[in-house]
Image: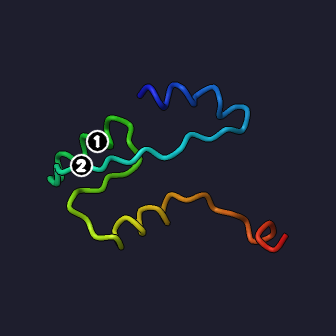
Amino acid sequence: KAIHDLFATSEQSGIRRPPIVAVTANAFEEDRRRCLAAGMDDYLAKPFEPADLQALLERWKPKIPASTQAA
């Protein structure tokens, strides 16, 4: 919540809040729901495979419009 509050005023000036991801050994669905309810954007339970982390990073990395990629 503190991170959300910190960036709340910054978003108006174009500064976006980074995604907040829980990385935890608590792997039950109830734990996932609790993390998301607390304001986290995503959840990754340990132990995880490198491919799981890669997929999570791909999901949350900023999307760059095709028109600016060529520039």
* Of residues 50 and 22, the one drawn nearer to the viewer in this rendering: 50
In the image, what residue occupies the spot 38% across and 42% down?
Answer: 40
Q: Going 32% across and 52% down the picture, which residue do you hit?
A: 43
Query: Circle 2 is placed at which residue position?
Result: 24
Mark 2: few, some, or many residues within 10 Å (few <14, many ≥20)? some
The image shows residue 47, relative to residue 29, as above or below, that is below
Q: CA distance from mark 1 to mark 2?
A: 10 Å
Residue located 61% across and 57% down the image: 62
Compared with residue 66, is residue 18 higher up or lower down, i.e. above or below?
A: above
1 or 2: mark nearer the eye: 2
Q: Is residue 69 left or right of residue 40?
A: right
- Circle 2 sits in a helix, a strand or a loop, which is it? strand
Task: Kindly identify which residue carries mark 1.
Answer: 35
Residue in view at x 55 percent, y 59 percent = 61
What amino acid is at disc 1? Cys
Quarter holding the N terminus is top left
